[in-house]
Image: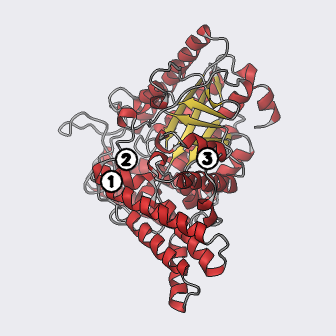
């Protein structure tokens, strides 16, 4: 942050602060093809969430406002956004989507279905604006746009596990360290600032993760209230020391998140908002939310976006009331930490980005409280008390069960075996060079990709979509280790190594020795 922002933090936070954490993750889908799901989820996230959110931040900043937010996009998502292949494929995907809108418009005009034609025209205009932003405003490089916001002090980057691994279920502490160290290096390289804080994937925590965080140089991390020891009473508005003078925990505001994303009581379920279901012929969403598939109403973006503004004002006032109530009982202001996931904001809740824009404008014009990020708040108000932590997550039940199911057990066991193998190889060849070093680097890269939490969650939900991908990474990991065993590689082996390096190429500066690092500290 700039010096003016830093020096005035305490005075601006007299009524408390709201820390919005823009989270986002997509497993490694680069060049994954189109079926069964392929790259589509990545392109949808770019089109419906990432670009629109960047437009909001840039628009407000260019108007002289300071929309302070934290950015916690997973390192593997950032790597994909920076990849030229992904950028080219996104343009192709977006052009196909726009062609589908044009075909729907012509069809509905012929059929004299005026409202559907109106929606097709709306989607066409909206999509053309997204594509123009991508190609003209950001020059196809969304990561460079994020880096600029970080440099201007508008955005505070947070680190994360390299491939969004669910850290509590990794078998070896070396893997936890490697995920965090590679993730921190990636965020620093791509966004231009070393992150002071960490967003734990799924807010998953267990004993030992805190030690790895300290060793990686992390100053603070965000947890779910389920990770607070049951015999401890801690308000979510006040950070606490996990390790005195070394590591701080901030709690996510569960009630605030439910106010936004709960289908039953949150904004996302409002009957004016766009439903996820799509027209069978055009594959475009054209209906509003409904409790019944038998009774559906046509969607109207005009009314939906007005409702988003109303919900933004409501959330701002709701947050202000909570911060005032806290300030009345304490001698220092509180901080409300609210994660906003890219999978929801825009992708599953189409009006979510309009809600975010209206929320930021309301806060910045009405001055109900401060927009902040954790670092300046913690510089102004260092914790006074410690907290004891236990296993927890933001999954159902606040435990690890969403990822630790019988259906995911074979994959967890296979990943554990691969961890043992790669750690052994890293320690066996501490000074590898040439092809052996390349093979070991790729073995670690494949292991990290196989550790992504997405695969465990898909298996736990009995969803076979893309579930073959972690097994492919594990097979490549084992093959790379077998190549590293050899004193030299023949031409066929060298071609195979180069081909796999091209297929799975995130984290270009990864060094296999990260898995041989000491874990005691």
Q: Residue at x 50, y 73 (%)?
A: 503
Q: Which mark is residue 403?
A: 2
As helix, strand or loop, the secondary structure at mark 2 comes to loop
Q: Position of residue 338 (x, y in %)?
A: 53, 31
Q: Note whether 266 is above or below 483 in the view shown.
A: above
Provide residue 491's location: percent of width, then percent of height.
54, 91
Which residue is tagged 1?
408
Q: Is there CB contact under 8 Å for labels 3 and 1?
A: no
Element type at mark 3: loop
> Does the CB distance between marks 2 and 3 fall below 8 Å?
no
Q: Residue at x 64, y 20 (%)?
A: 16
Mark 3 residue crowding within 10 angstroms, few (<14) / some (14–19) / many (20+): many
Q: Which residue is mark 3?
A: 159
Eye-nearest disc, 3 or 1: 1
* Distance of label 1 from label 2 (alpha carbons): 7 Å
Q: Position of residue 429 (x, y in %)?
A: 61, 72
Marks 2 and 3, Cα distance to the nearest angstrom?
A: 22 Å
- Vertical placement of residue 261 versus 436, above or below: above
The quadrant in which residue 368 appears is: top right
**Is 375 left, or right, of 37 in this rendering?**
right
Secondary structure of the residue carrying numbered label 1: helix
Depth check, front residue: 489 or 456:
489
């Amino acid at each position: 942050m700039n010096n003016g922002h830093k020096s005035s933090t305490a005075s601006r936070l007299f009524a408390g602060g709201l820390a919005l954490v823009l989270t986002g993750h997509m497993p490694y889908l680069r060049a994954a093809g189109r079926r069964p799901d392929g790259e589509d989820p990545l392109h949808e996230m770019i089109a419906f969430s990432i670009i629109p959110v960047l437009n909001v931040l840039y628009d407000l900043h260019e108007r002289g406002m300071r929309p302070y937010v934290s950015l916690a996009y997973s390192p593997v998502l950032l790597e994909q956004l920076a990849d030229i292949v992904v950028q080219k494929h996104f343009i192709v995907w977006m052009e196909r989507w726009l062609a589908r809108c044009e075909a729907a418009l012509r069809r509905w005009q012929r059929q004299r279905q005026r409202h559907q034609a109106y929606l097709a025209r709306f989607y066409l205009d909206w999509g053309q604006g997204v594509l123009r932003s991508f190609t003209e405003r950001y020059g196809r490089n969304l990561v460079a746009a994020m880096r600029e916001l970080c440099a201007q002090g508008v955005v505070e980057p947070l680190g994360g596990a390299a491939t969004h691994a669910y850290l509590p279920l990794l078998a070896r502490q070396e893997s936890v360290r490697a995920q965090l160290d590679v993730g921190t290096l990636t965020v620093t390289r791509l966004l231009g600032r070393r992150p002071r804080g960490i967003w734990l994937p799924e807010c998953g925590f267990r004993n030992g993760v805190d030690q790895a965080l300290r060793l990686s140089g992390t100053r603070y991390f965000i947890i779910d209230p389920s990770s607070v020891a049951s015999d401890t009473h801690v308000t979510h508005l006040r950070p606490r020391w996990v390790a005195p003078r070394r590591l701080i925990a901030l709690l996510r505001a569960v009630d605030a998140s439910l106010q936004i994303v709960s289908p039953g009581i949150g904004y996302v379920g409002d009957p004016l908002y766009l439903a996820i279901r799509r027209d069978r012929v055009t594959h475009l969403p054209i209906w509003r939310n409904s409790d019944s598939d038998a009774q559906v109403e046509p969607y109207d973006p005009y009314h939906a976006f007005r409702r988003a503004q109303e919900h933004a004002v409501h959330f701002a006032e709701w947050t202000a009331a909570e911060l005032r109530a806290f300030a009345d009982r304490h001698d220092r202001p509180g901080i409300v930490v609210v994660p906003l996931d890219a999978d929801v904001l825009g992708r599953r809740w189409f009006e979510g980005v309009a809600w975010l824009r209206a929320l930021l404008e309301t806060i910045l014009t009405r001055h109900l409280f401060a927009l902040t990020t954790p670092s300046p708040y913690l510089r102004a108000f260092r914790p006074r008390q410690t907290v004891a932590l236990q296993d927890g997550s933001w999954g159902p039940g606040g435990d690890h069960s969403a990822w630790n199911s019988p259906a995911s057990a074979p994959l967890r066991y296979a990943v554990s075996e691969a961890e043992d193998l790669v750690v052994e190889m890293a320690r066996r060849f501490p000074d590898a060079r040439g092809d052996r070093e390349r093979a070991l680097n790729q073995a670690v890269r494949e292991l990290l990709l196989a550790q992504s939490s997405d695969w465990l969650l898909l298996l736990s939900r009995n969803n076979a979509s893309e579930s073959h991908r972690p097994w492919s990474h594990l097979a490549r990991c084992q093959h790379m280790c077998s190549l590293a065993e050899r004193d030299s590689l023949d031409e066929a082996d060298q071609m195979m190594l180069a081909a796999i390096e091209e297929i799975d190429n995130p984290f270009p500066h990864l060094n296999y020795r990260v898995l041989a690092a000491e874990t005691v500290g």
